[in-house]
Amino acid sequence: MNLKARDWHNWVSVLLILPMLLVGFTSIFLAHKKELGLNEIDLTPYVGWLPGYGASAMRAMSPEIRSTATLADGSTLVGTQNGLFRADAAGVTAVAELAGDQVRDILPMTWGVIVAAKSGVWLEQDGRWQRVLKGDAWNASANLDGSVTVTLKERGPLSSPDGRFWSAPAVLVAGIASLPLEEIPPERVTLGKLMIDLHTGKAFLGKDGEWVWIDLLGFVWIFLGFTGLWLWWRTQTKKRDAAIKRAQTQPGIAHA
């Protein structure tokens, strides 16, 4: 019984080595995705064989509408979690430049249309789309002077009079930066957020240091995976060698 339990333990461990290695490697990559520019590497044409990205998964996905805007020509732009679409009397068509992108906000201006998306800020003029800012854009708002202000995750607010030339609103940025610490409300920590921050290490090392925690755990998983595989291989090799030796020492077995 002990022998069987040990064998089950060994084989289950071997089967779990691949998930362990995947968790370890992906954790390290996720901790440094900004520095490595992972969000800029498009692998869409190469991952269709994975069940989560295949045709059946795409058919099961219902577009989640995040924003809408009606344009001067009567058509409507619809932003979803996987692309931007234009709806008019002829039907609904996808905007190719933002295919598969998460569209957060749409803002029609007199000089063009601004779209805030996960891949950055996009400008449409005369039917042509162009990305004018890279980064994770959260929203876009119109100002009284006819300019537009967008907010990016890493860069904060940026303003532009025409969608092409962008600069930080100095007065707004300086005002936020000068707020006394006691006037800034504390971050709301729910049980769900605490679980995530304990998992990522942010609760122990802060946002700037969580990569140390993630890297450490990632290397631990990789170390356990490779050493477990090596120990399993040595065990199987010893069993094979012992079986060969027993067979060679049995009566009637010809020795080479």
Image (cartoon, grey):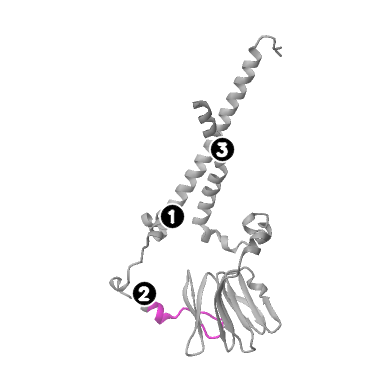
Q: Is residue 234 above or below residue 217?
A: above
Q: Is residue 81 above or below residue 35?
A: below
Residue, disc 1: 200
Q: Mark 1: which secondary structure? A: helix
Residue type marked 1: Thr
Q: Nearer the viewer, residue 188 or 97?
A: 188
Q: Position of residue 59 (x, y in %)?
A: 66, 64
Residue type marked 3: Val
Q: Main secondary structure of the magenta part?
A: loop
Q: Is residue 226 above or below residue 110?
A: above
Circle 2 Cα neighbour tier, 10 Å, few/some/many (<14 / 14–19 / ≥20): few
Q: Position of residue 183 (x, y in %)?
A: 30, 74
Distance in Å between CA atoms under marks 1 and 3:
26 Å
Residue, disc 2: 177
Q: Position of residue 167 (x, y in %)?
A: 49, 79
Q: Is residue 43 visible?
A: no
Distance in Å between CA atoms under marks 2 and 1:
27 Å
Residue, disc 3: 14
Q: Is residue 63 visible?
A: yes
Q: Mark 2: which secondary structure? A: helix
Q: Which residues are magenta?
A: 160-174
Left or right of 184, for residue 83? right
Residue type marked 2: Ala
Circle 3 Cα neighbour tier, 10 Å, few/some/many (<14 / 14–19 / ≥20): some
